[in-house]
Every structure is written in C-alpha cells, then in structure tokens.
Image (spheres, rainbow, N blue to C red):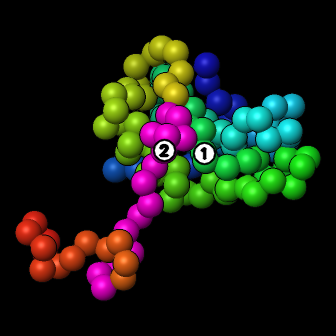
C-alpha cells in the first residue's frame, strides 16, 4: 500500500525523507470517538511498509466535541524514530507496521533547566 502524493507532507528524519498524511475527514469510528487519530507514514523514495501511528486522542473532526490531538511534524518524527527502534523497516515491502497509543511517541524534552529536560550534571550529560 502506498500513500497518494496529493495531500501528504514531507518530513526528513535522520536524513531520510518520509511522506505522511492524516485523513481529512474522520472515519465513522473516529467520528464517534471510538478510534483515535491515525497518521500514515512511508518513505518518500522507494516506499515499502507503511507505518500507521494511532495517536492518543480523538480526530479533530470528531462529531462529539471530544478532546483532540494534533499530528505535528515533531510528533511524526518521534513516531518514526520509535517505530524504527521497534523494528519497522520502511524500505522493505510488506504489510503495515502499527504503533499503538500505549507505545506512542514520548514527549520531546525541553531545554536544560526545565522539568523533564536532561540534566547537564547527570552522568552521560554534556
């Protein structure tokens, strides 16, 4: 399965170009809040297996006014890195690779000195 070029966005993660997309209209199960927002990602050149990321929130077009989550380039880049660590091989043909909300991307740490940021005095720090 490959993504159509129209309606997709390009992102470069670790010097590899990827194409990603979110459905503009929610599916029925996304509309009623039963399924979360999903993002599809594949390599821009020589696509193979598609990464399907289920984000922990409702589709912005849901019909019930549920809290939503946005798919940003930063969250897509985190998901790509996480999926690669979990065994996703984007250049190899095959079925979709699913990344579930429980396995979802971790937040990006802030600058040093902010909560959750890496401590520069900790072992392994700069």
Give percent across and percent down for residue 59: 76, 47
Query: Along the horizontal axis of the image, is 123 left or right of 110?
Result: left
Give percent across and percent down for residue 33: 79, 41
Mark 2 residue element: loop
Q: Nearer the viewer, residue 65 or 110?
A: 65
> Quadrant location of residue 37?
top right
- In the orientation shown, which residue stands out farthest toward the bottom? 113
* Looking at the image, residue 124 lies above or below residue 79: below
Q: Nearer the viewer, residue 102 or 47?
A: 102
On the rendered image, what quadrant is the N terminus found in?
top right
- In the orientation shown, which residue stands out farthest toward the top? 94
Q: Residue at x 52, y 50 (%)?
A: 76
* Looking at the image, residue 54 lies above or below residue 64: above
**Does the rendering let one see residue 70?**
yes
* Looking at the image, residue 43 lies above or below residue 78: above
For mark 2, what is the residue? 104
**Does the rendering let one see residue 20?**
no
Q: Callout 1: 10 Å neighbours few (<14), some, many (20+)?
A: many
- Magenta: main secondary structure equals loop
Q: CA distance from mark 1 to mark 2?
A: 7 Å
Q: Nearer the viewer, residue 1 or 25?
A: 25
On the rendered image, what quadrant is the C terminus found in?
bottom left
Q: Residue at x 40, y 19 (%)?
A: 92
Q: Which residues are magenta?
A: 99-113
Q: Is residue 101 magenta?
A: yes
For mark 1, what is the residue? 55
């Amino acid at each position: 399965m490959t993504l159509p070029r129209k309606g997709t966005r390009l992102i470069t993660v670790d010097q590899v170009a990827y194409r990603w997309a979110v459905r503009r209209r929610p599916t029925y199960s996304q509309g009623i809040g039963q399924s979360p927002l999903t993002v599809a990602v594949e390599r821009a050149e020589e696509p193979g297996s598609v990464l399907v990321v289920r984000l922990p929130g409702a589709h912005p077009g849901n019909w019930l006014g549920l809290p939503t989550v946005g798919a940003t380039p930063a969250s897509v880049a985190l998901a790509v890195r996480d999926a690669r660590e979990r065994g996703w091989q984007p250049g190899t043909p095959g079925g979709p690779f699913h990344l579930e909300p429980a396995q979802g991307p971790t937040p990006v740490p802030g600058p040093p000195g902010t909560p959750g940021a890496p401590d520069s005095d900790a072992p392994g720090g700069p």
